[in-house]
């Protein structure tokens, strides 16, 4: 805690030891601010976000630099569907405390989703505009689309519930309000709407709310509360009903047996007879086809004999095998294995005196570094997506050897170290990228990852790096074509 | 009993994230410690003058 007057560190004393200002009241104000934050936290955990918001506002009115209170308020704004106010709180929080502040991560996460969030906000505002011009159908369409989006606001759900209640679609309204309540149990708009919904619920015989309301209006009965239909049946009438049902079932079974089953049997026999006739016809057709096929087989066998004799009398043709040497390269290319490709090319003979061979060989050398280097890099990205981090690191280092050093490759190697949990190495690569390529577009990602690691391990030392002198470990001997080739 | 048109008045357009700067500038950021600080500075100024 620092003195509000001179900025000196305060002790347990009631006065500032540097400027002598009485800080009793100041300490009480800060303590009250913290207490209000704790109260807000309790309410937030119980999902009373409206209540939590009130406490947090009071906490910040006492101490605007209460960072946890401001961050929590931003989180609540985000959860309830006010992302702009959430960003406001986090930006101010970051302004007061730049390092070791979770608001940095919140802002980075929002930045990733900013497009999606803005689309949701635009849809909601569009729906309000439609309602102002009395285009209720268009507003309904816009709000329904909004319900399917990844980011949806409580106010949007409340507005749609209001529209459903206006159309007597109480079931749909109830579902939306239940979703609103799950987010914030203390929202008074949700509470009011749910109370209004309960007022409209009247138990009818068949459970149909719409029918019950229509009946109530037609009969002039506008009582509030539950209308219970009269029930005058006696207990013994249930027994008679059951008896009538049983008698009906027995009679029905008898009718089915005597009238329906004989006709079903006769239909079944007719079908069987016609099926049998069809099968006999098919068998005789197949028999004649077999006879024809046997004759054809005899003719083809005679032809084979003649051709074999012809082959035996012809001299063999020698096939040139020299292009088979490119098969390992082709196989490695199909398997997308850059290391295998490099090894296969290293085994090719540069001195073969064949024009086509030389064309292929020289083309491979021209594409060697750049094409293979990019292949290795994108393979590394695929491995990262599949969480194969060691394999990804291997490919990134291969790309480094083939393409040389750049901010993106340095960042990618750092990322693979971070993913396997080697944070000191990861920090080395991120710090190197930041120092060596300060203006590169990929440095932004290195900065974000660095902040994330520091957020988890605040005490981590930033390694010393020499810009322009990257030390990459774990590299393998890679064949490099000679200059004359 | 809810009246649709009346309830609709309570729904205002939501600001987009690009408008955050305006929201920050529009709302004041003073707190009670700022007030306390100005009181202390005013009383310190009064003491000097007297």
Image (tube, coloured by chain):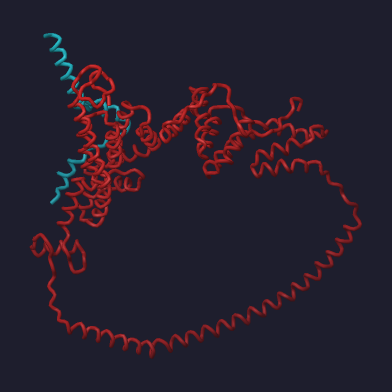
Q: Nearer the viewer, residue B23 or A454?
A: A454
Query: In the rendered image of this protein, which colour is used for chain A?
Result: red
Q: Is residue A115 visible?
A: yes
Query: In the rendered image of this protein, which colour is used for chain B?
Result: cyan
Q: How many marks?
A: 0
Horizontal side, residue A47 vs residue A388: left or right:
left
Residue at the image position 14 percent from the left and 64 percent from the top: A215
Q: Is residue A155 visible?
A: no
Residue at the image position 76 percent from the left and 25 percent from the top: A484
Quadrant in which the N terminus of chain A appears: top left
Relative to residue A464, is residue A456 depicted above or below? below
Residue at the image position 70 percent from the left and 42 percent from the top: A330
Query: Where, by quadrant of the figure, is residue A12 drawn?
Result: top left
Q: Position of residue A189 (x, y in %)?
A: 19, 46
Relative to residue A462, is residue A212 depicted above or below? below
Residue at the image position 17 percent from the left and 84 percent from the top: A236
Horizontal side, residue A314 vs residue A254: left or right:
right
Q: Residue furthest front?
A: A13
Q: Position of residue A383 (x, y in %)?
A: 56, 42
Q: Position of residue A261 (x, y in %)?
A: 42, 87
Relative to residue A160, is residue A116 depicted above or below? above
Relative to residue A470, is residue A309 depicted above or below? below
Q: Nearer the viewer, residue A466 or A116?
A: A466
């Amino acid at each position: 805690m620092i003195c509000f007057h001179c900025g000196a560190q305060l002790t347990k004393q009631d006065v500032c030891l540097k400027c002598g200002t009485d800080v009793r009241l100041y300490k009480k104000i800060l303590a009250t601010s913290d207490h209000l934050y704790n109260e807000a936290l309790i309410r937030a955990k119980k999902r009373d976000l409206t209540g939590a918001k009130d406490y947090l506002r009071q906490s910040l009115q006492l101490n605007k630099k209460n960072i946890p209170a401001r961050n929590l308020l931003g989180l609540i704004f985000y959860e309830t569907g006010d992302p702009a106010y959430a960003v406001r709180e986090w930006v101010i929080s970051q302004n007061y405390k730049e390092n070791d502040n979770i608001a940095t991560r919140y802002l980075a996460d929002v930045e990733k989703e900013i497009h999606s969030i803005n689309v949701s906000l635009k849809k909601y505002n569009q729906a309000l505009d439609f309602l102002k011009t009395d285009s209720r159908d268009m507003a309904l369409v816009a709000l329904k689309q909004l319900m399917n989006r990844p980011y949806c606001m409580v106010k949007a759900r409340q507005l749609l519930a209001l529209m459903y209640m206006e159309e007597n679609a109480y079931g749909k309204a109830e579902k939306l309000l239940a979703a609103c309540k799950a987010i914030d149990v203390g929202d008074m708009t949700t509470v009011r709407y749910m109370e209004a919904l309960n007022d409209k619920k009247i138990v009818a015989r068949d459970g149909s709310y719409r029918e019950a309301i229509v009946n109530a209006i037609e009969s002039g009965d506008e009582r509030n509360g539950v209308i219970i239909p009269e029930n005058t049946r006696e207990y013994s009438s249930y027994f008679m009903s059951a008896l009538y049902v049983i008698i009906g079932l027995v009679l029905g079974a008898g009718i089915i047996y005597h009238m329906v089953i004989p006709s079903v049997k006769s239909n079944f026999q007719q079908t069987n007879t016609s099926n049998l006739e069809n099968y006999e016809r098919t068998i005789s057709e197949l028999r004649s086809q077999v006879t024809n096929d046997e004759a054809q087989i005899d003719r083809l066998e005679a032809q084979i004999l003649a051709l074999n004799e012809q082959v035996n009398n012809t001299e063999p043709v020698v096939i040139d095998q020299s292009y088979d040497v490119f098969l390992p390269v082709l196989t490695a290319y199909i398997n997308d294995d850059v290391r295998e490709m490099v090894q296969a090319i290293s085994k090719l003979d540069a001195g073969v005196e064949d024009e086509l061979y030389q064309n292929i060989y020289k083309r491979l050398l021209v594409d060697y570094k750049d094409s293979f280097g990019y292949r290795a890099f994108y393979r590394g990205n695929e491995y990262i997506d599949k969480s194969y981090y060691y394999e990804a690191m291997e490919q990134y280092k291969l790309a480094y050897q083939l393409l040389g050093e750049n901010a993106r490759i340095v960042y990618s190697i750092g990322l693979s170290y971070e993913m396997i949990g080697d944070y000191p190495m990861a920090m080395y690569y991120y710090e190197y990228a930041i120092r060596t390529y300060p203006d590169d577009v990929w440095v932004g990602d290195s900065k974000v990852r660095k902040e994330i690691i520091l957020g988890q391990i605040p005490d981590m030392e930033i390694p010393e790096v020499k810009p322009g002198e990257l030390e990459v470990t774990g590299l393998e001997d890679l064949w490099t074509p000679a200059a004359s080739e | 009993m809810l009246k649709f048109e009346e309830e609709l008045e309570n729904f205002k357009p939501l600001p987009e994230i690009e408008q955050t700067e305006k929201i920050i500038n529009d709302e004041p950021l003073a707190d009670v410690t700022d007030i306390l600080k100005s009181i202390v500075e005013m009383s310190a100024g009064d003491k000097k003058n007297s």
